[in-house]
Image (cartoon, helix red, strand yellow):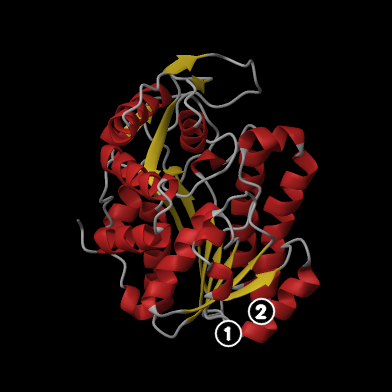
Amino acid sequence: MTDLSFYRGKRVLITGHSGFKGSWMSEVLLKAGADVTGYALEPPTEPSLFRLLSLDSKIKSIKGDIRDLETLKKTFDDVKPEIVIHMAAQPIVRESYQSPVYTYEVNVMGTVNVLESIRLSDSVKSFVNVTTDKVYKNKEWEWGYRENEELNGYDPYSNSKSCSELLTESYRNSFFMDRETAISTMRAGNVIGGGDFASDRIVPDCVRAASEKKDIIVRNPYSTRPYQHVLEPVMAYLMVAERQYHDKGLAGSYNVGPDEADCWTTGRLVSSFCEQWNEMMKADIAWRNVSDKGPHEAGFLKLDCSKIKRVFGWRPRWNVEEAMRKIMEWNQEYFGGGDVCGVVDQQIEDYIKGR
């Protein structure tokens, strides 16, 4: 698993650190004693986990757009990062239908700019490009996609991430074969956890409705997704970044997802949410199946994670039920006006210790 002691004193640059997953990543690295620099726009939501954790005062937080190569390159020159985790993205499928040009600019040219900055740097030894499980051409089959399957996402978000994978491979082959820099791409499943306030994500949508004592509207309860707590991929990214830092031969593309039993339908996930929320809040929230006839989204999606298990001995630690309990724990503290930073730190410690 992840050796966080490796990160003590290491210079780590995270793009997209102001987002939900980037905030969890930043907090983990702070606890590990890393020298963390973040490069991102303002947090994409209000409220945001980034603000709740006061990360702007804990790390070097640089406000910047990854479409701005000049500013990004200057950041690399100033920070001289040893490890780069690229998480900045336009991450919402539905938004990609509304803003396809912006989505491609951020997810494709943004990745080009990160790779170009690494190419022009002499300090980076390990780079992880975070993509998505949606990079694969979805054939609606019932088994998990493997890393050697065809990359051809359907919608602008998914397709732009497929492009990000392909251009990363091109840069690796063209510029890094004879250099020490190790480069991997990582394709995570659907991430859930405390502190996510995004639109058009199922758990934040559930929390918003439930907190207003409204029924939860589910547009496709029969879709199947590889749900996992946010710490599962975050720790996996850090594990791969650390291991390939020592051994470039480990670099490649890796799926990060739950075991087969935790690939749930959306309806089952929301039912679990309602059950736990109602018990925690003494409420009576339910959900309703209401299609809004929105744009195409994949119906069935699983990942085959045998490669990362074989190469690194990685295993997921928390199943979906446990992930939902952690979400409830966070929200109970948040809506009670308590110490959400303390909850995040405690959950990180629990994950590391296998509790």
Does dot 2 land on a helix, a strand or a loop? helix
Q: Nearer the viewer, residue 233 or 155?
A: 233
The residue under label 2 is which amino acid type? Phe
Which residue is drawn at the image coordinates 47% and 20% (left, top)? Answer: 215
Three-letter amino acid code of the residue under disc 1? Ser
Q: Residue at x 72, y 53 (%)?
A: 106
The location of residue 155, given as percent across then percent down, is 65, 33
Residue 303 visible, this angle:
no
Q: Is residue 55 left or right of residue 114?
A: left
> Of 52 and 243, which appears nearest the observer?
52
Q: Secondary structure at mark 1?
A: loop
Q: Are marks 2 and 1 in contact (CB under 8 Å)?
A: yes
Figure quadrant of residue 124 = bottom right
Residue nearest the observer in this picture, 349 or 77: 349
The numbered disc on residue 76 is 2
Residue 321 screen position, x and y as percent: 27, 37
Q: Is residue 96 left or right of residue 342?
A: right
Q: Is residue 296 above or below residue 23?
A: above
Q: Earlier in the sequence, mark 2 or mark 1?
A: 2
Where is residue 188? Give x, y as percent: 45, 48
Viewer-nearest residue: 26 or 102: 26
Image quadrant occupied by the N terminus:
bottom left
Q: Which residue is mark 1?
A: 123
Depth check, mark 2 against mark 1: the one in front is 2
Q: Is residue 48 visible?
A: yes
